[in-house]
Amino acid sequence: MNYCVVGLQWGDEGKGKVVDILAEHSDIVVRYGGGANAGHTVIVGDSRFALHLLPSGSVRPDTICVISNGVVVDPDVLIKGINTLAEKDISLDGRLLISENAHVVLDYHKQEDQLREESLAKNKLGTTIRGIGPCYADKVGRSYTVRMGDLRDTEALEAKLQTIVAYKNKIFAALYNAESIGADEIFEKCKIYAAKLLPFTIDTTEFLHKSIAGGKSILFEGAQGSLLDLDHGTFPFVTSSNSTSLGMPAGCGVPAKFVDKFIGVIKAYTTRVGAGPFPAEQDNETGQYIRDKGNEYGTTTGRPRRCGWFDAVAVAYGVTIGGIDEVALMHLDTLSGLEELKICKAYKINGEETTFFPANEARLSLAKPVYETVPGWSEDLTEVNDFQDLPVDAQNYVRRIEELIGKPITFVGVGPKRSQTIFRQ
């Protein structure tokens, strides 16, 4: 079986845990989009791994890990991730593969990201300042970009960096009155990157197609969430890549027809980081309760996440555009202790009720949630390993979400560990 796992909300749904579980049955795990702005958390025993560029399957010692062409690679973050795993006796030698066509995030991308956000003041997008957007912009622009394969020819790379940095300095000075950056310093860093990362760098598209022909099982791992998709999310408050399953084919060169099952990941409630409309947000004691109980603080930035009730309209949209077959529901345990829960089952926009998510910032900002109220539960769920042993109201909550999103929930997370997962199929 080949699987593709994607988030169906605004990210942070718990994809890392789901990928880690499925990786046990996969030969290869592929990260196909996004960059170091992603934060996938995997807990193994007493060890907690915060992964930003490495696929979530990297903590399993026999799994081949692929960073494909759709990812923008921050070499500093990637090298740190490799070293962190090595310190815990997890080696990636011989099993990490990086696409030679993946674009490289360099210092000027991060500077551009920060300068742009500062210039927007109260209208800023709320990026992670990791240089992701500027790197993707350079990729689309084509003229001023560095790819992993460019690290092989240092002489040509040095000349290219001189051109790129001179161009960037003109932009920074004209738009932001910023100080110049040095091309030589960036080039010296690139030589270090080349020494450490070129041994892993290959044509990953060729590798993946040979693996498919050889009958290998592949797990494709998405980053961020469907509502942050550049084309189908809540633009402009989105990421700079296609974070739905629609981004998988372009992001790794493998057609969607080779995926046997698309699995969407959701939380039992909704969170969002940064600016943008959020109809079901609870900027109150309920939201703070969820934030504290669910430890809703960013893996990448540490920023507190905005929290709210489960939004079935938004998730059903992610299911529809992503061609999702089944769903993993995480963080059910976080809701324990609330006497009643609300589910957003529809929106009212200008007095008209709709159940189809408007992926348009102007329309979504007008949306008023239509809630239904269901009983909560007080029991601790973290030791439950069978669905029938959950409190009846917790079972009913899961079943009601299934009805509203139109897909079966086959995984239920009741804690961060691998073992704290209820399998319904």
Image (cartoon, rainbow, N blue to C red):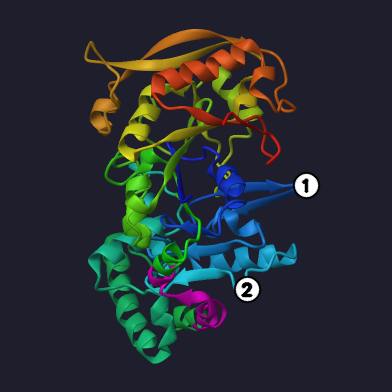
Q: Is residue 124 visible?
A: no
- Disc 2 designates what residue? 93
Report the amino acid beneath label 2.
Asp
Q: Identify the main secondary structure in magenta.
A: helix
**Mark before the other along the chain sequence, 2 or 1:** 1
Task: Check disc 1 and report its element: helix, strand or loop.
Answer: loop
Say if the magenta span includes residue 193: yes
Residue 386, how many percent across, how many down?
A: 68, 25
| Range shown magenta | 191-207
| Horizontal relation, residue 191 to residue 137: left or right | right
Quadrant (top left/top right/bottom left/bottom right) for the C terminus: top right
Q: Report how far apart the C-alphas of labels 2 and 1 lie in the structure.
A: 24 Å
Which quadrant of the structure image shows residue 396? top right
| Horizontal relation, residue 169 to residue 308: left or right | left
Which is more toward the observer, 182 or 293? 293
Residue 55, how many percent across, how many down?
A: 54, 57
Q: In this view, does 28 lie above or below 15?
A: below
Mark 2 vs mark 1, foreground winner is 2
Which is more toward the observer, 144 or 18? 18
Say if the magenta span includes residue 3: no
Q: Which residue is drawn at 42% across and 69% down?
A: 210
- For mark 2, does the 10 Å Cα neighbourhood hold few (<14), some (14 to 19), or many (20 or more) residues? few
Q: Residue at x 49, y 21 (%)?
A: 309
Q: In this view, does 263 lie above or below 378?
A: below
Q: Which residue is drawn at 28% across and 24% down?
A: 356
Q: Can residue 246 be seen in this view?
A: yes
Residue 82, how many percent across, how many down?
A: 62, 67
Report the amino acid beneath label 1.
Asp
Q: Residue 46 carries which label?
A: 1
